[in-house]
Image (cartoon, rainbow, N blue to C red):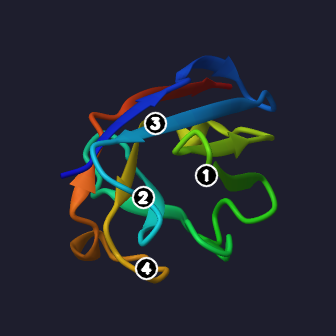
Amino acid sequence: QVQLVESGGGLVQAGDSLRLSCVASGRTFSNYAMGWFRQAPWKEREFVATIRWIGGATYYADSVKGRFTISRNNAENTGYLQMNSLKPEDTAVYYCAAGPTRLSTSRANYNYWGQGTQVTVSS
């Protein structure tokens, strides 16, 4: 079993930056890919970014490419999502997830989810 706890959300203005953290515990993370998803009010949860724990290969949604950076600290079992040049349309609850052994944009491939952290970007 894997437990994931996100932090770092908040209320910011357009153009600001935030860094989200996701601390994993419970079992080794080394075989998994970690992903970030987000869900805005009245919308489906959507893929944001993913990273392979070993090797560090990454993949991003087009909507965040060039603005967001996903990374991880293997020693601390922690993943990060650095969000720059935030826009009002980035407002959502952000979730980290783990599960697949390769990069995946599909929610169905992620077995473990955090509780989410709210990001609100004002214009």
Amino acid found under the numbered disc labelled 1: Asn
User: In the image, 30: left or right of 45?
Assistant: right
Q: Residue 104 — which label? A: 4
Between discs 2 and 3, the one toward the N terminus: 3
* Number of other residues with Cα within 10 Å of mark 1, as a class: few under 14, some 14 to 19, many 20 or more: some
Q: What's the CA distance linking mark 1 and mark 3?
A: 11 Å
Per the image, label 4 sits on a secondary structure element best described as: loop
Q: Which residue is mark 3?
A: 23
Between discs 1 and 3, the one toward the N terminus: 3
Q: Are marks 2 and 3 in contact (CB under 8 Å)?
A: no
Q: Nearer the viewer, mark 1 or mark 3?
A: 1
Q: What's the CA distance linking mark 2 and mark 3?
A: 10 Å
Q: What's the CA distance linking mark 2 and mark 1?
A: 8 Å
- x then y, percent, for residue 24: 40, 42
Point 29% across, 52% down: residue: 43
Q: Nearer the viewer, mark 2 or mark 3?
A: 2
Q: Residue 29 — which label? A: 2
Amino acid found under the numbered disc labelled 4: Ser
Q: Which residue is mark 1?
A: 74
* Number of other residues with Cα within 10 Å of mark 3, as a class: few under 14, some 14 to 19, many 20 or more: some
Amino acid found under the numbered disc labelled 2: Phe
Per the image, label 2 sits on a secondary structure element best described as: loop
User: In the image, 11: left or right of 83?
Assistant: left
Between discs 4 and 1, the one toward the N terminus: 1
